[in-house]
Amino acid sequence: MTTTHDAVTPDQIFQLAQGFMASKHLFAANELGLFEALGEGPADLAGLAARTGLPQRTARISADAMVALGLLERHGDRYANTPVAATFLAGTTPADFRPLLRFWDRLSYPAWTDLAGALGRGRPSHEIFEIDDELVPVMSAGIDAATAGACRALPGVAGLPVGSRVLDIGGGTGSWARALAESDPELTATVFELPEVAAVAEQGLRTTTRIDVRAGNVLTDDLPTGYDAFLLANVIHYFTPETNQAILRKVRAAAKPGGLLLVADFWTDPTHTQPLPAALMAGEFAIHVNDGDVYSVEEGTAWLADTGWAFTGHRPLAGPITLVTAEAV
């Protein structure tokens, strides 16, 4: 007779513990151009090695790992991208995840080796803002790739009136504001960012006349007024609940009654365990910033009520990023 104890296996532990191997195989295949090479069409091992410049032995190791992980297909002796790899990793479509994988490989992966230390201390060994200058473009491109789907979805979900004036607080390179402006030829926006980030945003937005950039710190500076809507995209997860409430109060002080608030982030359920990618991203934030965390929609709703906003909805954008909306009361 089989007991419950006898049926228990360590399979789940092995699957989870070997996750780092799968990640590094994926990062390596991306860095070595495996998916780009197969974007030219299927190839046998000799052809794949020739396209990538890899020895046949190591080309086989990488390609077979990607077959095992479901990102490549093998038919006889020929390898080909799966539809997922062809769409997101071959560099042939606007939905390009290659910069995100480089970000995770070069910035996140090394930092995650100290996850236990960061959790034990309550602080990372250093914040992501302290990275070397040559990694700043890797960070910016990776964040843009990670949020590209949510950016594209935002205009259709936000429901902003035509011709709105939007203040994009902590707007990074301006990708969120650009998505809104591209969907509405009458919309104007201002990206409000730290001086060093604002300089990068200005360069990237030079040809977008309806978006301007203003340098400032939401934690210490007054916000500009005269806007119909305010956007906080991937800002909340940087800070403590108390700081987030202070930010929401500051935004409310700059808003007119009826002003709209859009908060895009990795919102979770009340247990902070769903959706799974958001729960895992709590670790990403913990190893990159001092107060990084994820928060539930219920927590956000309570903050809004305490800071002069009326919650109006929670809607999906793309992947684990969702949108909480509110109106100034």
Image (tube, rainbow, N blue to C red):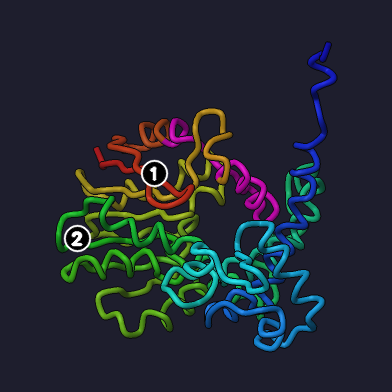
Range of the magenta residues? Answer: 278-300
Q: Quadrant of the N terminus?
A: top right
Work out whether mark 2 precedes mark 1 in sequence or the reverse, and give the earlier one: 2
Q: Which residue is mark 1?
A: 249
Query: Pointers 2 and 1 in contact (CB under 8 A)?
Result: no
Residue 115 to residue 28: above or below: above
Q: Which mark is residue 164?
A: 2
Identified by mark 2, the residue type is Ser
Tell me if 202 is positioned left or right of 238 in this view. left
- Dominant secondary structure of the residues highlighted in magenta in the image: helix
Residue 234 to residue 172: above or below: above
Q: Does the stretch in magenta take in 287?
A: yes
Is residue 106 visible from the viewing direction of this image?
no
Q: Residue at x 43, y 64 (%)?
A: 148
| Quadrant of the image occupied by residue 76 | bottom right
Identified by mark 1, the residue type is Arg
Rendered location of residue 241, percent (x, y):
53, 39
Q: Secondary structure at mark 2?
A: loop
Tell me if 260 is positioned left or right of 121 in this view. left
Rendered location of residue 166, percent (x, y):
27, 61
